[in-house]
Amino acid sequence: MIPQHLIEEILTDVDFVDDGNGPVIALAHGAGGGVRENFGPLIDSRREQFRFAGPYYPGTASTPNSQGQLDISTLADQVVAAGIRAGGDTFPIVGLSLGAAVAVTAAARHPEHVSALVLTVGLAHSDAQITAFTQIWRSLAAHEEWEALAALMTYSIGTESSLAALSPADYAATVEAVRSGYPAGGAAHAELAGRTDVTALFDDIDVPVLVVVGGQDRIVLPATARAFSDISGARVVEYPDAGHIFTPEQSARWADDVFDFIGQL
C-alpha cells in the first residue's frame, strides 16, 4: 500500500488530470499520447458520475522530460498515486496502448488499490511490429524529421478505410495536427515501448479485466493486444474496423463498453 504521505512525493513535478465527481477511475495513457488526449471520450461523457485521475508521463503536458530511460514501475506508481490523491482507495485503471502495460504493472505492484483493469489496444509485449515502429520513430525524432514522423504516425493510427477517405488537404491537415501535438518526451516513450513485456505479471493479476482490441490496428497488432486474454477471467471485445486511434463512433462504443464493465464490478 502506498502511504498517504508519499503520494505528493511520487507526484513531484508530475502534471496530472483530476476531473469529475464520483468514484475514482485512474488513467494510464499511451506512448506519445496524454491523459486528455487519449481519454477525452471517457472523461467528457461521464465526468458527472466519475472522477478521472491520471499522470502525464515525462515530456508530456508540463511534466519535465526524463534524464534517463523511463521505468514502467515508476509510471505505474504515479498512476496509482494519482488515483489515491483524487480520493480513491481502490479503483479501476483504464490503460491505452503502452498504458495497458503500465496498468498491469500497477495492479501487480499495488493489488490493494486496483479493483479492475480495462486494457485498450494494449501493448502486452514488444513484438516485431513494435520493434520496427519504435526504431523508426526514435530515428526520425533523433534527426528532427518531424514532418516525416507525423506522416508515420498518421499512416500508423489509420486504417485502410480511414486513409482512403482522406483528401490531400485532409491528409496535410492531419499530419500538421499530429506534428503540432507531438510531445517532447515521445521518443523516450517509444524506447520504453520497445522493451516492454508484462506477460510475466499475468499470473499476479486477480481482478476483473476487460481487453479491447482494434481489429485493424497498425501499431499494436491485434494478436499482441489479445495476449492480455491470458489473464485469468479476462473478457475480450474486438472492434473489427478499428485502428489504434478510434473514430468518434468507435470512441462512443468504447465508452459504453468501459462503463458497462465498470458498472458490473
Image (spheres, rainbow, N blue to C red):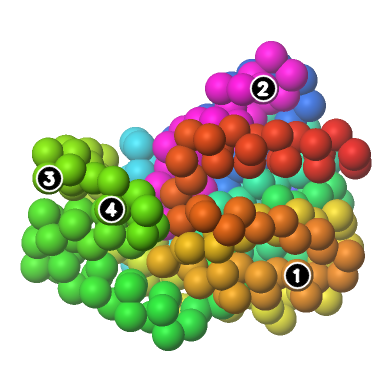
Residue 50 sits in quarter: top right
Hey, what amino acid is under mark 1? Ser
| Image location (x, y in percent) of residue 96 | 55, 52
- Residue position for label 2: 46
Query: Alpha carbon of mark 4 to alpha carbon of mark 2: how far?
Result: 33 Å
| Image location (x, y in percent) of residue 49 | 74, 19
Of badges 1 and 4, nearer the viewer stands 4
Q: Earlier in the sequence, mark 1 or mark 4?
A: 4
Q: Looking at the image, can residue 169 be seen?
A: yes
Residue at image x 76%, y 44%?
92
Q: Earlier in the sequence, mark 3 or mark 2?
A: 2
Residue 131 sits in quarter: bottom left
Secondary element type, mark 3 = helix
| Image location (x, y in percent) of residue 10 | 57, 46
Residue at image x 35%, y 49%?
162
Instruction: Say which mark, if any, is on residue 229.
Output: 1
Q: How many marks?
A: 4
Hey, what amino acid is under mark 3? Pro
Of badges 3 and 1, nearer the viewer stands 3
Q: Looking at the image, can residue 53 be seen?
A: no
Residue at image x 51%, y 72%?
221
Instruction: Say which mark, if any, is on residue 168.
Output: 3
- Residue position for label 4: 164
Secondary element type, mark 4 = helix
Along the horizontal axis of the image, is 262 left or right of 165?
right
